Image: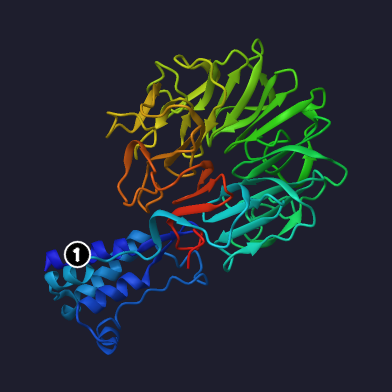
Amino acid sequence: MRFHSLFIIATVLLSIQLIDGVMCLDSSVLTHLAWSLGLSNNQQQEDTDNVEVDLTEDESPTEKKDTEQRLKEILASMEDSPDILQMDMNSFAHQMEGFVDPSVFSLPQQVLNITDVKAICTNGYSTVALTRDGHIIQWGISVEGYQKMSIPYLVTNISCGDYYTTALTETGELWSWGRDGSPLGHGRGVTHRPNYQSKEPARVNGLDDEVIVSFSSGQDHSLACTEEGEVYSWGADTYGQTGQTPGREYKRPALISALSEEKIVKVAAGGFHSLFLSEDGKLFYSGQLNGQGETANCRRVLAEISIETMSCGGDHMLAVSTEGHVYAWGWSEHGQIGVNGTQGEKKIEIPTKVEGLQRVKTVVGAKHGHSLAVYAWGWSEHGQIGVNGTQGEKKIEIPTKIEGLQRVKTVVGAKHGHSLAVTEDGDLFAWGWNEQGQLGLGDTYDRTVPNHVTSLKSVVDVDGGYKHTAVLNDRGEVFAFGDSVYGQLGQQ
């Protein structure tokens, strides 16, 4: 009896899904379990009348119980029904044998009816394409089929946040859409109807007389830089990440007065922090790192060094000097800072030179906690660092050369656990987390070193969402692979 109970417990646990942070039971899995037990619909009703599962949103907080305790109660009530517990394990295994999830595509699939694309980006559960004639097409969650976004001007650039998208038009205007809990700049706060989707683009308020040349989307805040070098910010300012007064929420863009004496040319938004680069190579930062370290409001860092470019990860920052040296600081629990000798240190508050990296041109601070250049370091539970011989090691603290990658043009750290690289020859390499086939290798096994995705050629752009990947080739065709449960691959 205990063995059967454990099997049912495992099945129920497998049926749990996280939807917007709420644990929900997948009825399809439970139905399959009951069917495998040989129960008819009437028997299911008769034998489970004593099992009540109420997961409605109307339940008051005082009535809600701890999820684990509720599962125990459900399973305990099932023990009173012997018919449910008496099952043929071999029969159940036979029913599940060869089961294939129809929403998973582990090989690249061409997105039909989408051509002449020049740029792509992915958020958690959607894919967005910018065509060469300046139009935007989106598919995935909250969209039925392919949806052409209605923006009255041609679009020149796009950027995807976790659950929202921002577009820059040829006239220098910013338009945004997505989940209302995101910093859209439409006059509603990030806490306003957090699960409501703004499906149609709307112009970001408060920038009517400005021409935007650079913009960036963080976790709960956004940044925009004008052609005059002024910077606007909006969204949540819990840790001072907007460069404004900490602890407030800015529903519309507000000018960052602390940078009024500088001409800013590039901005980067991270999880709870921001970076600002001036025309003459000065670097400023604002905010805090996952609640760690000192809060700062547009403080200059690396004052004696001229900075060429910079990048924000989810909880750390990277900067490249004009001499090609890399500097890093921030949250380093998983080694994503890449500074030797910092094992055990959870935060590096002072920008520190990353030894072993020279003549670096570009760095990418990935949101899932590792940094990628020609060398890699950081969190590597799924092998996303790509360093051979590190299987089982959860963090690589010292920048280590990724073997098998040569003449790399673009490196992308996807939003959750896998990494992608495009070479100058147009070849695509993928490694890391592969639970839903998001590496495009024809299976769902994780990879700890870069693997060549041989079915794709002439790749010019790539981006990774939560569990899916989108690829653009030089003919303007889009391919996608991984999880397609919300239609984010553009398949039926």
Q: Position of residue 446 (x, y in %)?
A: 32, 44
In depth, the one of 151 and 343 nearer the eye is 151
* Viewer-side residue, 455 vs 171: 455
Q: Which residue is mark 1?
A: 7
Q: Is residue 47 above or below residue 67?
A: below
Q: Secondary structure at mark 1?
A: helix
Task: Name the quadrant containing residue 212.
Answer: top right
Residue 253 in the image: above or below residue 116: above
Tell me the residue at 52%/56% (across/down): 125
Is residue 207 toward the left or the right of residue 470 in the image? right
Q: Position of residue 59 (x, y in %)?
A: 49, 70
Residue at left 55%, top 15%? 325
Q: Position of residue 54 (x, y in %)?
A: 42, 73
Farthest residue to the bottom: give it.
Answer: 42
Q: Residue at x 66, y 43 (%)?
A: 221
Q: Check the image and report above or below for 364 versus 447.
A: above
Farthest residue, direction right: 209
Q: Amino acid at mark 1?
A: Phe
Quarter holding the N terminus? bottom left
Name which residue lies at 80% across and 29% down: 229
Task: Give x and y (percent) for residue 23.
Answer: 42, 61
Q: Is residue 462 left or right of residue 232?
A: left
- Report if residue 88 is visible in the image: yes
- The scheme the figure's colours follow is rainbow
